[in-house]
Amino acid sequence: MILIDKENIDFGMILSQHALSKTSFRKILIEFFYRSKHSLSVEEIISNISHPVDKVSVYRALNAFEKNGLIHKVPDKANLIRYALCPSECSSSKHLHNHAHLLCSNCNETYCINDFKIPIVNECKGFVINNLKIILEGSCIDCQQSYS
């Protein structure tokens, strides 16, 4: 994900464009996703957001964001659910995720690798493919710089 300057983006408008109500928590949550360089877990959201919120509200907002094409679930080394921003092509009717994910072996973060496109595979020797995921394991940019 790319860091985006808060002054250049209207988070309430993003919520409106995805048919989501513009509550103060949802605005803070979507801004948190835009400012994050990696995927987020529910625990990270709760511990890093200044807005008082309970787990149920976080899960409800995340489910609404996912349903409306704002975020998607990403893999985690510990098999926990993490979330990342969707590309702008996603919508409530269809998620278009044709990218790999990097699991950093050092910091255990998950990153969307949008430069690595997954080939479209419809059939493979009689199997019908419904979902295809490519997970790369290695070192993220931050970890590479700290070990240099």
Image (tube, grey):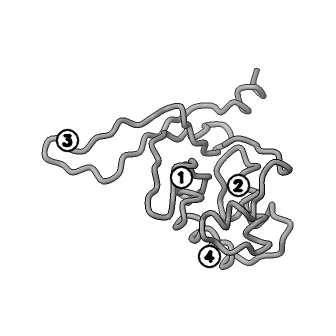
Which of the numbered marks, if any, corresponds to residue 124?
3
Camera-nearest label, 4 or 1: 4
Q: Nearer the viewer, residue 140 or 127?
A: 127
> Nearer the N terminus, badge 1 or badge 3?
1
Which of the numbered marks, if any, corresponds to residue 74?
1
> Nearer the N terminus, badge 1 or badge 2?
2
> Which residue in the structure is indicated by mark 4?
60
- Give amino acid for label 2: Phe
Contact flag, marks 3 and 4 (Cβ < 8 Å): no
Contact flag, marks 1 and 2 (Cβ < 8 Å): no
Residue drawn 46% across the image and 55% down it: 95
> Nearer the N terminus, badge 2 or badge 4?
2
- Give amino acid for label 3: Cys
> Which residue in the structure is indicated by mark 2?
33
The x, y position of residue 12, in whole percent, is 75, 65
- Give amino acid for label 1: Val
Vertical placement of residue 104 versus 97, above or below: above
- Of all residues shown, which one is farthest toward the top? 148
Q: Secondary structure at mark 2?
A: helix
